[in-house]
Amino acid sequence: MIHAKQYSSAGPNFIIIHGLFGNADNWHSIAQNLSEHFNVYCIDLPNHGLSDSMVEATYPKMAQAVLDWANENSIDTFHLMGHSMGGKVAMQMASMTPEHRIEKLIVADMSPVDYQPSHLSILEGLKAIEETTITSRKEADTLLSDYEPVLGIRQFLLKNLVRNEEGHYQLSLSVKNINDSYPTILRKPEIDRPVDVPTLFIKGELSDYITQDYANTIMTLFPQASFKMIPGTGHWLHAEKPMPFTSLVKRFLQST
């Protein structure tokens, strides 16, 4: 089961997919803004938020879960955007569904390539939280600080804390499934043919997730790709500069 938050309007359908360790709520402010023009759905990926857990979370399996949810909700055509790991899920979806079902695709700071591990310490920290009885958010932050020194990243990760029936805090993440699937998450999506969908890749200037070295791969798999860069931003470009990011998204989706 896929959980989604809807921000409704009479406009075209627009599905937004968060990245690793995120959830639908990460996009709340941007979704509210975009709902003036689009019928926005922010989804929780498997193993995240309120969606079901998934063992062996490959890109085809995650993509199919989102497509099944769209089918169940009679969302026949839609715009699609994914950030980071969600960008890979979105690219996978575009390769698996008939052309013209996805009208436009936006990939935020991600390329269809393999990446090196960069979250191993975070995963250890999340496992430590799971193995500890946590009674306050401050306690969770103190524990996580042994594994992740950057406050902003810890604050993002701890948005997954929810209070259980005993009054303790736990993570709304399937940490074991994410950890077991992590080698697969690092890999590129399984795309075996060019995706003929108008696609916008948005890069954070200070991020290395989209580089010149990846341009040929992107253009081979997404021949209708265009590129934009947001100055002074890293991988979390939509959180660092939400207004320029949202303006780029609107302009691309509303262009003919």
Image: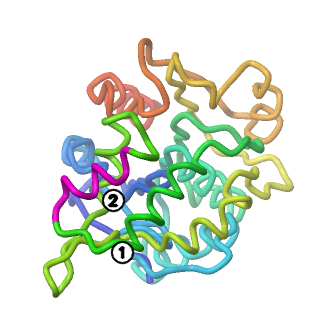
Tags 1 and 2 touching, CB below 8 Å: yes
Q: Residue at x 44, y 64 (%)?
A: 128
Q: Mark on residue 24? A: 2
**Type of amino acid under label 1:** His
**Type of amino acid under label 2:** Ala
Q: Is residue 39 visible?
A: no
Distance in Å between CA atoms under marks 1 and 2: 9 Å
Q: Determine whether, in the image, residue 66 is placed left or right of residue 220.
A: left
In the image, is residue 160 above or below residue 239? below
First to last magenta residue range: 136-145
In the image, is residue 124 above or below residue 62? above
Give the residue number, with chain letter if any, for mark 1. 3
In the image, is residue 219 above or below residue 67? above
Counting from the top left corner in percent of width and height, residue 184 is at: 73, 61
Q: Tag 2, which secondary structure?
A: helix
- Asked if the stretch drawn in magenta spans residue 139, the answer is yes
**What is the magenta segment's predominant secondary structure?**
helix
Q: Quadrant of residue 51?
A: bottom left
Q: Residue at x 65, y 28 (%)?
A: 210
Nearest the viewer among 104 and 185 is 185
